[in-house]
Amino acid sequence: DIPEASEFTYMLKPGGATRCYDTVIERLRAQDQRIKEAISKLPYAIRALNPKVTRILYLLTDGEDNQSRTTVRHFQHFMHEQKTKHNLKSIFLAANIGNAEIVGTQMGFDSNTCLTIGNNYHLSSNGMASAGHVLRQFSQNMPAPAFTPLQRASSQAHPASSTQDDTDDDQPDRHLIRNHLRGRAQRSKAGIF
C-alpha cells in the first residue's frame, strides 16, 4: 500500500527529532574504522609511506540538536580533535536555526565553511550548489576554502522576504546579484580586487 500524501505531510512536520551530535560522532568513528581497514589492506610499501587521508564531513540540518546525549561542548571538542588529529575538513549547512556561522562555530566548524540556507527550493538549491564548490576546493587541497559573499547572499532569505511562506521560489534574487556585480565593477574600476 502506498501512503496518501497527507500521511507524508504529517510525517514531515517538525517534531523535535534532530539527533545531530551523536550521529556525527558515530559516523566519523565508523569512517575512521573504515579508513584504518582500507589502509591495512594496502601493500606494505604504500603503508610505509604513511599515507595522509583527508576526511570530509558535510552536515546539512534543518534544526538544532534536541535528541543527542552529547553536549555541544563535547561535540566542539570532538570536532577540534578530528580536525587536528584526523585531517577532517567540514562544511555545515543549516536552515531554521538562525545564523549558521555562529551556530556552526559553537559546534566546532570553521565559520568560513558554514552557510545559512533558506527553507525553500531556490535558496536551499543555491546553498547546496555552493557547498559543492567548497567540496571541490577541499578535494583539490586548495588553501582556506570558504563560501563567498555572493554564495552566502544567494542562499539565505533576506529580511524583506522573511515573511514569505515556504513556497518554491524559482526566480533568482536579481537585485542582489545586480548589486554584487555593480560593486565588483566599481571595485575593479578603482583597482580594488
Image (tube, grey):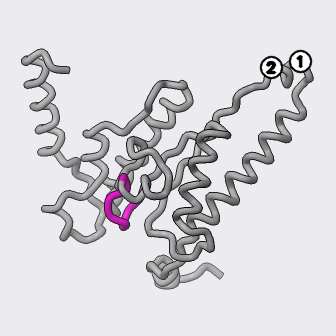
Say which mark, if any, is on residue 151.
Answer: none
Residue 90 screen position, x and y as percent: 53, 44
**Would you identify the image quadrant in which residue 67 lies?**
bottom right
Residue 50 left/right relative to 170: right
The residue under the point 80% across, 47% down is: 33
The residue under the point 28% across, 54% down is: 156
Q: Gap in Å between the C-alphas at discs 1 and 2? A: 7 Å
Kind of residue indicated by mark 1: Ala
**Would you identify the image quadrant in which residue 180 lies?**
top left
Rendered position, 119 above or below 177: below
- Quarter of the figure with the C terminus: top left
So how many labels did they put on this image? Answer: 2
Residue 70 screen position, x and y as percent: 61, 69
Say which mark, if any, is on residue 49.
Answer: 2
In this rendered view, identify the residue nearer to me: 10 or 118. 118
Disc 2 residue crowd, few under 14, some 14–19, many 20+, Cα 10 Å? few
Residue 27 screen position, x and y as percent: 68, 56
- Secondary structure at badge 1 equals helix
Give yes or no for contact between labels 1 and 2 (Cβ–Cβ under 8 Å): yes
The residue under the point 54% across, 25% down is: 141
Kind of residue indicated by mark 2: Leu
Point out the stretch of residues depicted in magenta.
94-101
In this rendered view, identify the residue nearer to me: 186 or 170. 186
Residue highlighted by disc 1: 45
Residue 38 left/right relative to 151: right
Membership of 84 in magenta stretch: no
Magenta stretch, overall SS: loop
The residue under the point 66% across, 40% down is: 85
Residue 41 screen position, x and y as percent: 90, 33
- Secondary structure at badge 2 equals loop
